[in-house]
């Protein structure tokens, strides 16, 4: 029987996943057989998860050393960061909705989010029996604050903002969304699953230190260079996690707040190892490299006469014909489209200038 081999990343331009850092790969292998879902039994990986959540909290503005470059407001919080390592952004977003629903008292709860929100919120609404109200984005693909304000009501339990949208890499006006949420008695969640490891090196206002947000999704297995699966869910207050907890009478641990029961110790260990190896200088260098590369690539496309969206975070969105798209796919390039049919190219750590030069050469050959 032929041994199966995974696909290489040398022509993958559509994915927000990437090659893990070597330290993450090695740590993940050591913890393959551990289950952080029962930290009383698997104490070592439980301690690693605490360290991981603490590091994520520092990166996202909950630590004593604020990771952003600009001066930010001090914020009060209830002890150390609260959260856990999820299987990814989908689980974290579902859990954020679940926590808000459980803490609210609405008979018919709803969640208000921009139309740019990740499709995991559609899943959350269906699974949890809440209404998802998506509202238009503005001309630059960010949440329209007026539309959000018009959509909330007494049944709103959660307002969602995106910090690094999956289609355009846009950052919503998070402080304004938090204000709308709290004025109506709702919670505010930020989905920074992809953008969270890039945004600390920008001037954007997106995290717990910039606004009184209540929860955040932030994924180490994307730009954090951890192994899959390793998402992240953070709460400002312990009550956010408490609202998720269920009794676990046959485990050594008395309760469990995660959505899945058994979880991957490999993901936890890999996330801890990657962050310890790369925060902050390694992540800063990667952000600066990706940002510069995305800007260069967008310029190359514009010089060829293509319509390219402004680059905010390193995602390049370009209008290519169906013929060019199909020809590039036939040549092995892994590409994806936005909902409106534009081609999106995500400049992840595995994407190099040489790789994009090859892409441009193949694109030139389709004309």
Image: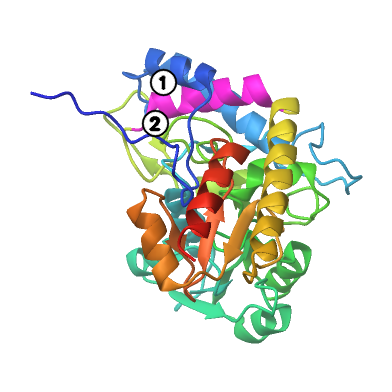
The vertical placement of 260 against 34, above or below, is: below
Residue 73 on the magenta segment: no
Colour mapping: rainbow
**Residue 130 placed where, x, y %?**
42, 72
**Residue 39 placed where, x, y %?**
42, 23
Q: Which residue is mark 1?
A: 40
Location of residue 176 (image quadrant): bottom right
Question: Within 10 angstroms of label 2, few (less than 14), some, or many (20 or more) residues?
Answer: some
The residue located at (42%, 20%) in the rendering is 28
Relative to 199, 329 lies left or right: left
**Residue 102 placed where, x, y %?**
47, 60
- Can residue 106 be seen by looking at this rendering? yes
Question: Within 10 angstroms of label 1, few (less than 14), some, or many (20 or more) residues?
Answer: some
Disc number lying in front (2 or 1): 1
Of 24 and 345, which appears nearest the observer? 345
Query: Is there CB contact under 8 Å for labels 2 and 1?
Result: yes
Highlighted magenta segment, given as a residue range: 263-279
The residue located at (86%, 40%) in the rendering is 69
């Amino acid at each position: 029987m032929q041994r199966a081999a995974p696909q290489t990343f040398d022509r993958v331009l559509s994915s927000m996943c990437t090659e893990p850092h070597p330290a993450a790969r090695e740590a993940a292998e050591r913890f393959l057989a551990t289950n952080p879902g029962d930290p009383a039994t698997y104490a070592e990986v439980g301690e690693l998860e605490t360290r991981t959540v603490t590091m994520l909290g520092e990166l996202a503005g909950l630590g004593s050393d604020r990771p952003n470059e600009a001066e930010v407001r001090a914020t009060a919080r209830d002890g150390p960061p609260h959260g856990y390592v999820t299987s990814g952004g989908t689980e974290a977003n579902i859990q954020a909705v679940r926590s808000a629903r459980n803490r609210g008292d609405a008979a018919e709860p709803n969640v208000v989010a921009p139309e740019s929100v990740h499709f995991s919120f559609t899943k959350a609404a269906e699974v949890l029996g809440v209404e998802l109200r998506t509202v238009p984005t503005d001309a630059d693909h960010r949440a329209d604050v007026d539309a959000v304000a018009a959509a909330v009501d007494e049944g709103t339990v959660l307002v969602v903002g995106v910090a690094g949208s999956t289609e355009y890499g846009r950052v919503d006006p998070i402080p304004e969304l938090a204000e709308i949420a709290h004025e109506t008695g709702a919670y505010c969640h930020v989905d920074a699953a992809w953008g969270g490891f890039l945004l600390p090196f920008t001037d954007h206002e997106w995290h717990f230190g910039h606004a009184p947000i209540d929860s955040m999704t932030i994924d180490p297995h994307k730009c954090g260079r951890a192994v899959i699966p390793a998402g992240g869910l953070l709460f400002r207050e312990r009550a956010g996690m408490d609202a998720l907890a269920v009794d676990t009478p046959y485990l050594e641990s008395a309760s469990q707040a995660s959505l899945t029961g058994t979880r991957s110790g490999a993901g936890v260990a890999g996330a801890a190892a990657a962050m310890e190896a790369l925060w902050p200088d390694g992540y800063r260098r990667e952000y600066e490299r990706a940002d510069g590369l995305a800007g260069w690539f967008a310029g190359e496309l514009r010089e060829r006469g293509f319509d390219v969206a402004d680059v905010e975070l390193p995602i390049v969105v370009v209008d290519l014909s169906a013929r060019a798209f199909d020809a590039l796919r036939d040549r092995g390039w892994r590409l994806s489209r936005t909902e409106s049919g534009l081609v999106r190219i995500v400049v992840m750590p595995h994407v190099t200038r040489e790789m994009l030069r090859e892409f441009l050469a193949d694109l030139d050959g389709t004309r």
